[in-house]
Image: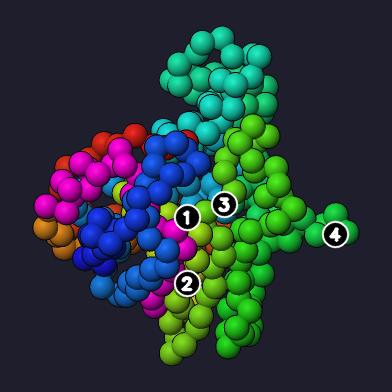
Amino acid sequence: MKQYLDLLQTIVDKGIDKDDRTGVGTRSLFGYQMRVNLSEGFPLLTTKKMFTKAIIHELLWFLMGDTNIKYLVENGVRIWNEWPYETYKASEEYENETLDEFVEKIKSDDSFAEKWGDLGPVYGKQWIRWEAPDGSEINQIQNAVDMIKNNPNSRRIIVSGWNVADIQSLIKGKTSAPPLCHTVFQFYVVNGKLSCQLYQRSADVFLGVPFNIASYSLLTMMMAQVTGLEPGDFVHTFGDVHIYKNHMDQVKLQLSREPKKLPTMKINPKVENIFEFNFDDFSLEGYDPHPRIKAQIAV
């Protein structure tokens, strides 16, 4: 993943220091693009160890149309916990629970999870349950599968997360999560291969972007399988790419490491429906990364 290290280095060298919503501050650039050929290996970062379990479970969670962290925490995935916890801390019901105690209550108390574990209308809702004006729900992923199969030359095979009406509630203090960072993605078919381009409006390059690359690459592979195609390219197009100021030491460490050979992601070939994958259908082979690098998420 030399492309990713090049992005880090470009921000370090050419970025502009900016204040941001979280109060942490960033070094930022506007406008960047990377292209990954999925036939060359699964683009999982090797310059630090990645939590593959979280990547797979999060993607399956999106495809369920779910927006509550209960499924994630029950499967040992913590990547969304801080947002609902911060909302809970600001409420009158907060009783000085730690984040870990909050997560345990999400696991054990269904009514608590229903009230405090929901992130609001984030990815799962927009991908699978987009609300139409007549009250019906639109499954954008199913629509994309159908178009890839029946009209592969279409330039309209698009899934949007940027639901302007719903975004009004994704403001800190109303619901947990910020407006969707992965704004829109488009599929493209040529020569029997399926490619995907994501536009990401905001990108935490040290913590978030490695997950995003792996997740959308895996989604492209899954979509290719269920539509009878081979994976092509994953194209990652960014708006605001930034490194948080409290991640600079971690970035320097990562840039000092040499990338290793990319692993291979094996997918159960028997699955033919995009909504019927489960965690055991995926097997990562040949992953030998450098050690994990810890960093604090900015909420």
Task: Give how far apart the Cα atoms at labels 2 and 1 are.
Answer: 15 Å
Q: Position of residue 19 (x, y in %)?
A: 43, 44
Proximity of marks 1 and 3: CB atoms separated by less than 8 Å: no
Q: Which residue is mark 4?
A: 133
Taking the image as drawn, is residue 211 in sight?
Answer: no
Magenta residue span: 230-256
- Mark 4: few, some, or many residues within 10 Å (few <14, many ≥20)? few
Could you tell me the amino acid type at mark 1? Ser
In the rendered structure, the answer to whether residue 204 lies left or right of residue 277 reads: left
Q: Position of residue 10 (x, y in %)?
A: 26, 63
Q: Which residue is mark 2?
A: 197
Disc number at residue 202? 1
Could you tell me the amino acid type at mark 4? Pro
Q: Which residue is mark 3?
A: 180
Q: Position of residue 96 (x, y in %)?
A: 51, 10
Q: Is residue 247 magenta?
A: yes
Which residue is most to the top?
Answer: 95
Disc number at residue 286? none
Q: SS for tag 4?
A: loop
Could you tell me the amino acid type at mark 3? Leu
